[in-house]
Image (tube, grey):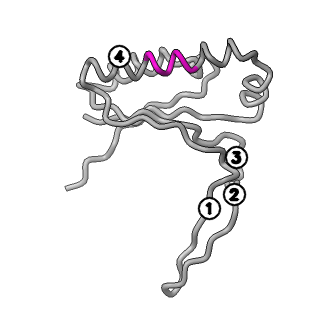
Amino acid sequence: MKYLIMIQMNPSARAMWDGMTEDQHAEGYQIHKDMVSRLEASGELVVSEALADVSLSKRLHVKDGVVTTTDGPYAEVKEYLAGFYLVDCENIDRAIEHAARLPEAALGLVEVRPVMELP
């Protein structure tokens, strides 16, 4: 079964990250590199990506075949998706086991969601 491990970001977490030293940034990145290595070794990694800043995204609307785009951010919420791991695990408990290793989990910024299998 596939699960999406979503890493959220919000203004207070962003401020905390921006206030860290280069060594602390390197430590955080290393945790993610180690996660990728573990998931690759176990064969459970489908794909993992960090996302660019939400201000660089585009929102689109299609009406009568005409595409209109606007600049972001768009959501009326403070949290936004910062990155993800798509994993293929035997159950959600295994996906949670992986997700709990992420430093963002200590801030309550990690969510695990099953991927729907369409017919």
Classify 10 Å Cα crowding around label 1: few (below 14), some (14-19), many (20 and above). few
Classify 10 Å Cα crowding around label 3: few (below 14), some (14-19), many (20 and above). few
Q: Mark 2 sits on what residue?
A: 72
Please give the range of residues in magenta: 29-34
Classify 10 Å Cα crowding around label 4: few (below 14), some (14-19), many (20 and above). some
Q: Are marks 4 and 1 in contact (CB under 8 Å)?
A: no
Identify which residue, 31 or 86, lies in the foreground. 31
Q: Amino acid at mark 2?
A: Gly
Residues at marks 3 and 4, CA–CA distance in whole angstroms: 33 Å
Q: Mark 1 sits on what residue?
A: 58
Q: Amino acid at mark 3?
A: Val
Corner quadrant of residue 113? top left
Checking the image for residue 77, the label placed there is 3
- The mark nearer the N terminus, 2 or 1, is 1
Residues at marks 2 and 1, CA–CA distance in whole angstroms: 6 Å
Residues at marks 2 and 4, CA–CA distance in whole angstroms: 34 Å
Q: Mark 4 sits on what residue?
A: 38
Q: Amino acid at mark 4?
A: Arg
Percent across and percent down for residue 10 are 70, 35
Classify 10 Å Cα crowding around label 2: few (below 14), some (14-19), many (20 and above). few
**3 lies above or below 96:** below
SS state under label 4 = helix
Residues at marks 2 and 3, CA–CA distance in whole angstroms: 13 Å
Quadrant of the drawing holding the N terminus: top left
Decide whether residue 40 is among the magenta residues: no
**18 lies above or below 55:** above
- The mark nearer the N terminus, 1 or 3, is 1
